[in-house]
Image: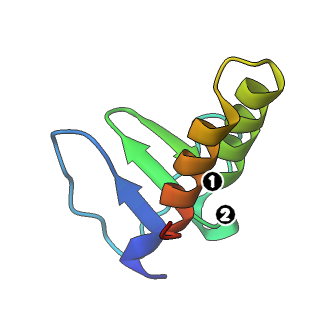
């Protein structure tokens, strides 16, 4: 498992053991079963739960589609 599968956010960066499992705080899946995991201070969210949240915001007009697309592009590493 590579270190780039778990992305850490927040002021306090921790060292991850490459074999350490990180679980999504929303769906409970480990980082071995998802594309990416974002690890924040006391909370984790997987790429799949992130996509669900963004889709919810788009469908409920809480976020402009162009802004949502920019977030998705940044998350997946696509240059515009």
Which residue is denoted by mark 2 in the rendering?
Answer: 34
Q: Is residue 53 above or below residue 3?
A: above
Expressed as whole percent of the image width and height from the top left, the position of residue 61 reads 75, 19
Residue at 25% in and 39% down: 10
Q: For this view, does 77 lie left or right of residue 66? A: left
- Please, what secondary structure does the residue beneath circle 2 have? loop
Of tags 2 and 1, which is closer to the observer?
1
- In the picture provided, is 42 more to the left or to the right than 73? left
Q: Residue 24's quadrant in the figure?
A: top right
Query: Please, is residue 59 above or below residue 23 in the view?
Result: above
Task: List x then y, in percent, for residue 79.
Answer: 48, 70
Q: Percent x, y for residue 38?
A: 46, 50
Location of residue 30 by image quarter: bottom right
**Residue at the (31%, 70%) spot, across then down:** 17
Q: Residue furthest right?
A: 59
Q: Quadrant of residue 26?
A: top right
10 versus 13 height, above or below: above
Looking at the image, residue 59 sits to the left or right of residue 69; the answer is: right
CA gap, disc 2 to disc 1? 7 Å
For label 1, count other residues whose C-alpha is less than 10 Å away and answer few (under 14), some (14-19) or many (20+).
some
How far from the left and from the top, in percent, is residue 69?
63, 48
The secondary element bearing badge 1 is classed as helix
Q: Vertically, is 63 above or below 26?
A: above
Identify the residue at horizontal 53%, vertical 47% (top origin).
Answer: 71
The answer to whether the residues at label 2 and label 1 have Cβ atoms under 8 Å apart is yes
In depth, the one of 25 and 9 nearer the eye is 9
Residue name at image x 49 percent, y 42 percent:
44
Q: Which residue is mark 1?
A: 47
Tell which circle, 2 or 1, labels the residue nearer the N-terminal end. 2
For mark 2, does the 10 Å Cα neighbourhood hold few (<14), some (14 to 19), or many (20 or more) residues? some
């Amino acid at each position: 498992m590579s270190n780039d599968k778990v992305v850490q956010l927040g002021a306090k960066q921790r060292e991850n053991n490459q074999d350490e499992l990180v679980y999504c705080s929303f769906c409970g899946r480990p980082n071995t079963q998802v594309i990416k995991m974002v690890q924040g201070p006391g909370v984790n969210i997987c790429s799949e739960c992130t996509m669900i949240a963004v889709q919810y915001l788009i469908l409920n007009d809480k976020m402009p589609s162009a802004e949502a697309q920019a977030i998705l592009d940044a998350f997946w590493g696509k240059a515009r």
